[in-house]
Amino acid sequence: MICRRFHCLPILTLFLFVFAACVYDAWAQNETVDVKKKTSPRNVLLYVVDDQGSDDASCYGNSVIKTPGLDSLAEEGTRFTRAFCTTSSCSASRSVILTGLVNHTNGQYGHQHGYNHFSSFSEIKSLPVLLEKAGFRTACFGKYHVAPKEVYRFGEYHDTTEPAVMAGQAKEFITADPTQPFFLYFCTTEPHRPFVRGGSDVFNPADVIVPPYLPDTPECRQELANYYGSVQRADKGLLRLIEILKQSSRWENTLVIYISDNGIAFPGAKTTLYEPGMRLPCVVRNPFAKKFGVVTDAMVTWADLTPTILDFAGALPKKPWFHGRSFLSVLEEEHPTGWDEIYASHTFHEITMYYPMRVVHTERYKYILNLANQLPYPFASDLYASSTWQGILSRGDKLYGARTVEAYLHRPRHELYELQSDPNEVKNLANDPRYAKVLAQMQAKLEAWQRKTKDPWVVKYKHE
């Protein structure tokens, strides 16, 4: 018996050794994969176009404009149907995008360039600075349009060119160091006015889709045709960047976000906080998501972008100070709960265009507080000079789209709209006694938000 036991021990020992080796090998392989997943750089591409409307892409239902880049991104990611800027003006909106703070808090009330001279407060912590601190390489390609530079600091700056060309120039930055994560802030000047910049993207004015907020006139159709071509040129830059990310093996670990800074550059949209001015395209592809081709009705704003990107990068502060919040966790949900209310704040476009507006927007109602309603609504210089608006003036037209010219130029202090029955925001319910309770509730929400975000214009509640 003793001899038999000892005779079996070498065989048993050999078996256990081989078994342990196999287990360790399997564990080691799994552990290697896990470590690789944990340590692979998580990159971010934030693609910002200039003045694109919410419905002006094929994946958003426009059957005339062809946007294969954005369409492919939507197929592999999440398309938002209710995404909003918080101020419909270039610099001010970009300051919100890059800080997670509304502009009446970050200080960028209006345009940065030239005599406008608006800039954020020096103590503001911006997205590129926070990501650089977290170990990211950072670069701004294209339109910058914020200030001061020490607040919105990038590692590299590159001038604006045609979107597809600029995308090719970004390849060196994308592929420079595979071990270090990158943040690429890519900003086209398309489809900003004057729209026509050459190329083969030409449309027949008879083919365009005139939305309800614009007049169906020859001038407007021609300008929309030019605008369509500009949208397609912007999309070519995105398409090229997607190709570069895939060719360089960065596609599978890069968060890609496509947005517009504000609404289409026509009166009735850009610079206003009506829906055409603030409801915008937003398509997000999280490479680690399990569901693709999602269409979500979550209400998000550009104040949510900075915390979302920091969340993806693993760099979200333990005690976030942002006005927005990360929507990373709801990208795979079509109808997430708790995403049904947003706020907006606009004060200037150009320095000459003082018209502070504050907005609270729920799923059903929208309340606009016009703090300088005694003034006629101011025009951005390029919008006033547009052939669309000049045609209205020359003919003496009474209507501008679904709204009267008078209602557009002279606004009451309070505007309340029921958006389900009145999506074009033409029937103001603020003086309707049947909606007095709704109005009071919306006003209370707005004032509380203004106080929470330290809005200087809260003094108006006391002095006016």
Image (cartoon, rainbow, N blue to C red):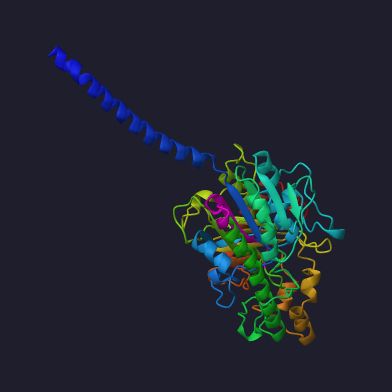
Magenta stretch: includes residue 259: yes
- From the top left corner, tell me how far across and down residue 373 is, in percent: 76, 65
User: Which of the 4 image quadrants contains residue 144?
Assistant: bottom right
Q: Give the range drawn in magenta.
A: 246-263
- From the top left corner, tell me how far across and down residue 409 is, in percent: 75, 73
- From the top left corner, tell me how far across and down residue 221 is, in percent: 67, 82
- Residue nearer the viewer, 464 or 132: 132
257 to the left or right of 330: right
Q: Residue placed farthest to the left in the image?
A: 1
Q: Residue placed farthest to the top in the image?
A: 2
- Residue nearer the viewer, 237 or 294: 237
Q: In this view, does 62 lie above or below 12?
A: below
Magenta stretch: includes residue 363: no
User: Which of the 4 image quadrants contains residue 404?
Assistant: bottom right
Q: Is residue 420 above or below residue 152?
A: below
- Residue nearer the viewer, 268 or 444: 268
450 to the left or right of 61: right
24 to the left or right of 440: left
- From the top left corner, tell me how far across and down residue 424 is, in percent: 60, 73
- Residue nearer the viewer, 87 or 453: 87
Q: Residue placed farthest to the right in the image?
A: 115
Q: Is residue 305 above or below residue 377?
A: above
